[in-house]
Image (cartoon, coloured by chain):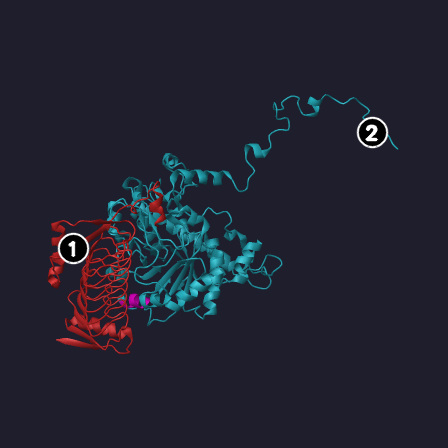
Amino acid sequence: MTHIVDVGERHIREINEEIQEAAARGDEIRVVNTLSRHNLGVGLPDGCKISFEGSVGYYCGGLNTGARIEVERNAGWAVGEGMSKGHITVGGYAGMSVGAAMINGTIHVKGDAGPRCGVAMKGGNIVVEGKIGYQSGFMAHQGKIIALGGAGESCADALWSAEVWVAGDVDSLGVDVNVVEPTAEEVAEVDAILDPLGLVDSSRNWRKMVAGERLWYFESRDASAWLMI
Amino acid sequence: MSEPYSYPFELPPEDEIRFADAGAIEGRPAGVPSSYDEGGSTRWTPEAISEVHALAQLGRYQVRGYNTFNKRMPTFDDLTFVPATMTRLPLEGYRESCTTKTILGGGRGTDVVAKPLELDIPIYIASMSFGALSANAKASLGYGASRVGTMTCTGEGGMLEEEREASNKLVYQMSPARYGIDLDHLRRADGLEIVVGQGAKPGTGGLLLGMKVSPRISQMRTLPEGVDQRSTIRHPDFLGADDLAVKIEELRIATNYQVPISLKMGATRPRYDVAIAAKAGADIVVVDGAEGGTGASPELLLNHTGIPTMSAIRAARESLDECGMSGKVSLVAAGGIRSGVDAAKCLALGADAVMIGNSAMIAMGCNSPRYLEDYAKLGTSPGACHHCHTGLCPVGVATQNPELEKRMDPHAGAERVARYLTAMTMEITALAKACGKSSVHNLEVEDLRALSFEASAFTGVKMAGIDRAFDW
């Protein structure tokens, strides 16, 4: 059965407790009258299926441990931050820091994503159908950020081992980025992520960005690397 | 007109006048002024010259561990206690009881924080990461703190199972880098600590050189092995105070309103920063002064950023008073606390508790006089070692080298930490009782006098004797 949670002006604790109780019962959850409130659906459990009417504020789906989350329209900052498992779909646009520090799972944004998309992410995948904002991928450890509609300035800034894949224009590159030609196998891996989302298009001209690895180490005699930090 | 005076004797030879007799240095009959062999420049000291030579060779700033070497920092020794005499009645220091129980983070009520941190003593172990410290050292701290009824904090490297097991109470740190972030770890913690800065290098993120990024560390932090890990300072998902308030709410939801949330900051502008942290919803504000230690930092930041702990405490307490948050928000002081005496001074200046890092490491064995040849390899000696950044800690405290780590026995270390904390607590109660207090939390600014203008000016504590604070 579907449990309806009416958000309105109720205390955020009460709303989240109602969501957690419904999830514990195994109900499918529909959250309505969201008013773009912050902190809706934090720390959701594995197996939970939940959808949010309209738009949500900051940290929706934060620290998710396996729920399947759908946001009908837009999401505020840090949707799915710190999530370890699960799948989040944002029907519209997403604000700053999509999937910040996430460990695993998938976040799919149908519109554009704001600055620092995938910042500090430790794994998993972020797929943005539109454009990703400036400094996306900042210090991302592992995982993939895939943007189908271009990227803003300072793209893939100071990466660890994560990859940023962009189809379309990149306004500018961040510090310490190498743009590499992906192999057919690597493109196939990305297509395998896009396939379940119905987003495969073999005509894309990918730019794959990885760390230049110069910022990984102190380079005492390369003053230019120092000026960047 | 009088005649010019003449000696009633013959003038001796010029050589004799110029000390050219036995022992004088050829060509330098006036001796060697100190400026010749020691140099007299207060600006170009031997240290300043060697710093230029180092920078000229390295092409980068120097990096090291430990804490500030800035000689201008005041010390807690600039303050003294003025125990009860005629105006007040002392307690019997050797006999009467003095409570040390400390509750942190309970001020906003149990509907916000169901389980405030209840500690038996007003001291706990500072957030030092597994990474900066060895696993054995982390376990020692956990067991030692548990033995005396207090707690430890994970630091930025994520939750180490050995530490969780050893620590009855453990605070989980949310660092900007969010290494190993895990909802389960948040929920297994007894408190959370959001760190926005540290006293050793406020405004700059953590640093762990490649020598310490071992296979286990790299796995816990999702980093390539052996990289020089330079962490972020800005959090990935909030920027200012208004966002922080939303973040704190998120963490309360995630932990089901069970545990308090601390906010740790380096001491820079505590009068404003502390008020903002309190307003944003922190249950505990930790103010870490410039004397605070670290496993590794650009040296210039250690020596030249932040304000002294003693000055930060007073500003922080006044800040909480002014915005009506004293009692609602707990204040913890940290940075350069070496003893129960220093800790007592922090309490008197307005802290509800203190956090110790370096001194707990020293209690475990940091800088102890053993393995002398390994200190020598680092170019240092026991008592002077500050080479935490190298990962070659001769005593196994600040290393990830398995062979060196064996030198840090977690059980003996635990007992040393427990005894040190016990002794510190005795020192605090001895001073509190002399000042007539039956609780260490009743220590107050009036119990102190300043021995220097600076200490008085920094803290508003009255000058000794004259009984007036240095007045601007």
Q: Which kind of residue does numbered mark 1 sit on?
A: Asn
Which subunit holds the residue at mark 2?
A: B
Q: In the rendered image, what is the letter of the chain coloured red?
A: A
Residue B372: where, in percent of width, then height?
38, 35
Residue A17 on image: x %, y %:
24, 72
Residue B269 picture location, percent across and down: 45, 60
User: Which residue is tagged 2?
Assistant: B5
Image disc number at residue B441? none
Q: Is residue A82 above or below residue B137?
A: below
Quarter occupied by residue B399: top left
**Local crowd size for mark 1, using a 10 Å CA cut-off: few (<14), some (14–19), many (≥20):** few
The kind of secondary structure element at disc 1 is loop
Q: Which residue is mark 1?
A: A205
Does B378 sit left or right of A140 as displayed? right
Q: Main secondary structure of the magenta part?
A: helix
Mark 1 falls within which chain? A
* Few, some or many residues within 10 Å of mark 2 (<14, 14–19, 20+): few
Image point 45% across, 70% down: which residue? Answer: B323
What is the tally of numbered marks visible in this picture? 2
- Mark 2: amino acid: Tyr
Secondary structure beneath label 2: loop
Front residue (pair B37, B293): B37
Does residue A16 appear to the left or right of B38 in the view shown? left
* The residue stretch that appears in magenta: B248-253
Q: Residue at x 40, y 37 (%)?
A: B57
Relative height, residue B262 to residue A57 (above, below): above
Q: Is label 2 in contact with label 1 (beta carbons under 8 Å)? A: no
- Quadrant in which residue B262 is drawn: bottom left
Mark 2 or mark 1: which is in front? 1
The reply to whether residue B166 is visible in this rendering is yes
In the depicted view, which residue is nearer to us: B136 or B62? B62
Q: Which chain is cyan?
A: B
